[in-house]
Amino acid sequence: MIAAMRIFCLLQVIWLATCSGSRSRNWAHHGASMFADLTTVEMKAVRAYLHGIPDMKLTNARDGTLKKNSILLIELHVPKKVEALRALDNGQAKPPREARVVVQFGNQTKPNITEYIVSPMPYPNSHRVNHFKAGKPISFDSRPKTNVEDAHIYNFLQRAFAKANNFLLETTGGFSFTNCSKWCLTFIDVAPRGLGPGERRTWIMLHKSVDGFFLHPVGVEVLINHQDLDPNKWTVEKVWYNQMYFNGVDHLVEKYESGELEIVKLPNHNTDDLFSTYMPRGQSNTPTNIYGPKLVEPQGPRYRVDRNFVEYAGWSFAYRVSSSTGIQIFDLRFNRERIAYEISLQEAISFYSGDTPAGMQTKYIDSGWFMGSSSFELASGIDCPEIASFVDLYHYQDSDKPVRYRNALCIFEMTTAMPLRRHFDSNLRGSYNFYGGLENTVLVLRTTSTVYNYDYIWDFIFYQNGVVEAKISATGYIHGTFFTPNGLHYGTKVNQHLLGNLHTHLIHYKVDLDISGRQNSLETLNLEFVNFTNPWSPKNSVVQSKLRRTEHKTERSAAFRFGKTLPRYINFYNPNKKNKWGYQKGYRIQFNSHAHSVVPRGSPEEKGISWSRYPLAVTRYRDSEGASSSIYAQGDPWEPVVNFEDYINNEDIVNKDLVAWVTVGFLHVPHSEDIPNTATPGNAVGFFLRPFNFFDEDPSLSSRSAIIVRPVKDGKSHIQRWTPDVVGHCVTDKPFYYNGTYAEV
């Protein structure tokens, strides 16, 4: 009777656990849509609602004038965490879907930028102003450049350089702005647009409009003041040419026509000069009549995607791609237990050095260029494997309708060609006791951002053992300036008239960890040497490493500055939850980065990127501290509406809801092999989230892809496996075989 009761209780526990797990999965699936990007129907509904408000006097974004009221951006407004968790953890009703809308009011006495939260979707009927922390207003001059303004800049340059046409033709090898047919000039504008708040002055480089035009500066740079909303009132303030500054185009032309100007004549453009193109050249050392290796899924995909909800090997998460900042994942769970509420890309910057005015002014802050909506089509077989699931993205940014970006995100499982774990247990007599191994397959969530010249490849990678990796790989064209001898202090000569300018990339992530709940703490682990008398040989001493644990109790204590060595282990743990062995369940952040500060603290633009002071800063979760940067930081880094430093106070972070703000990056000194493009090997950085006593043992033990081999008589092997013996004809028709012996020959 007692035995029967025990069996009944055990079955009841199993049933309750199964029901709880199923319920948890259903709630995660139910809540994923809270984080899904706006549909085209919702975007159009928001536009129609706002255009229907007479007082706003909204017109089309693509209208040719700058003096207008128009919508710059429509994207999802993510719900408050506490509201989302009610749905995710308790199955309650989801909060109404809302939209974040950026409106530029240019057709009024005092132009301004205003952000609104519009709700509910899909039938909006209300709006409210969206305020930044401390109610900081948005400077109109800090607004991102639009396509209309870009077109006006090109037209302005055409007019401004009409009188310099002969100069351009002679010095550029036949390129100009006027009646140029195929030998036309284009431009690259750099930012920030000025030297202080309230300015809109931009240095512009003239380039040949050919494939890879980024590598074809012609040596003319011009500073234009385009603050006025009437392009007819724009002015040229400075022109730089051949290491000399001129007070406008007239001044340059005057010196040229008088013969006082020393010119640098570029050779006539040679269409056979392929240095900036992808055209193959050189001796090929691989066969061209056969394909290289490809990924296959012998029995189809092993992951599931339902709209923005993804499940794979115990993992589940929701994803979105913000038009302003890019890829984000929410409600990240492993075996139905939440590890992070949000892991999201926040900002990417590249700060340059140079000898020319544009080179020394270039400090790109990429959310100001809408790096999220710069997610263009991915090429099957190159950007993602052919087996990937491709997803279209939709953005409403600087347009009058939603724009479809075909196949701009992909999801796929791949083998890393590296075992997740393995061991060969030798018997030391020419054979072995056993061999055990588990192949390492991972799920990859990928998108890209082509921000002007650079292409960023954004990956989230999910491993079978509870590890998740955030990774960014950089490729694309370098940002080059016209070569000057003094430029060698700031870069490398990579072509006859081209300097590859040195620069540093920094990437910022928000990592809202919820390790078995919202109450988390932070500890760091370092090593210290200890020296003590050897207990079994008192005449000798033992020198070895000892763990030193430090609990960080305040935000300021947990703000780790660049220039100081990071602790060896950085562990976020739940003080209230323990694993089987009595350890508090935790996850640690492991960096793969070569980042350093880009400018000293107190430099003019540094306030707009104050997050770049820290490889890691840990703060308490606040709804008002949802992002570390903004789309306005590029236009006004001097008085930013979001100053990350304001997030770091002396607040208690013990047993609290914590957010880790992670900075990764690398220095890039361009070199000849960056022509035509920077390659991805060696230019990838990121971080890992790794379980640290979160589980009782390696959770990948649940994988049935393991193989165990033991020797039997006559040199044969006994193979234990839990997947089909033969992979499939697409890979190999031969069953798995293992010998394991070794001997002299």
Image (cartoon, helix red, strand yellow):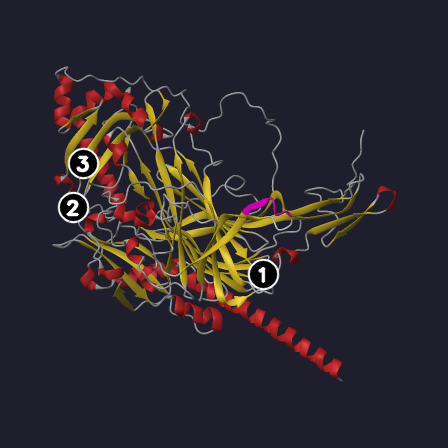
- In the image, residue 70 lies at what x, y percent? 24, 54
Whether residue 539 appears in magenta in the rendering, the answer is yes
The label nearer to you, 1 versus 3, is 1
Mark number, residue 695: 1
What type is the residue that disc 2 sits on?
Leu
The label nearer to you, 3 versus 2, is 3
Mark number, residue 567: none
Binning the other alpha carbons within 10 Å of mark 2 as few (below 14), some (14 to 19) or many (20 upward) gives some
- In the image, residue 92 lies at what x, y percent? 45, 74
- In the image, residue 332 lies at what x, y percent? 49, 60
Q: Of marks 1 and 3, which one's residue comes earlier in the chain?
A: 3
| Quarter the N terminus occupies | bottom right
Badge 2 element = loop
When asked about the image quadrant of residue 519, the answer is: bottom left
Mark number, residue 229: 2
Q: Find the magenta span and give its range.
A: 537-544
Q: Of marks 3 and 2, which one's residue comes earlier in the chain?
A: 3
Binning the other alpha carbons within 10 Å of mark 3 as few (below 14), some (14 to 19) or many (20 upward) gives many
Q: Which residue is mark 3?
A: 224
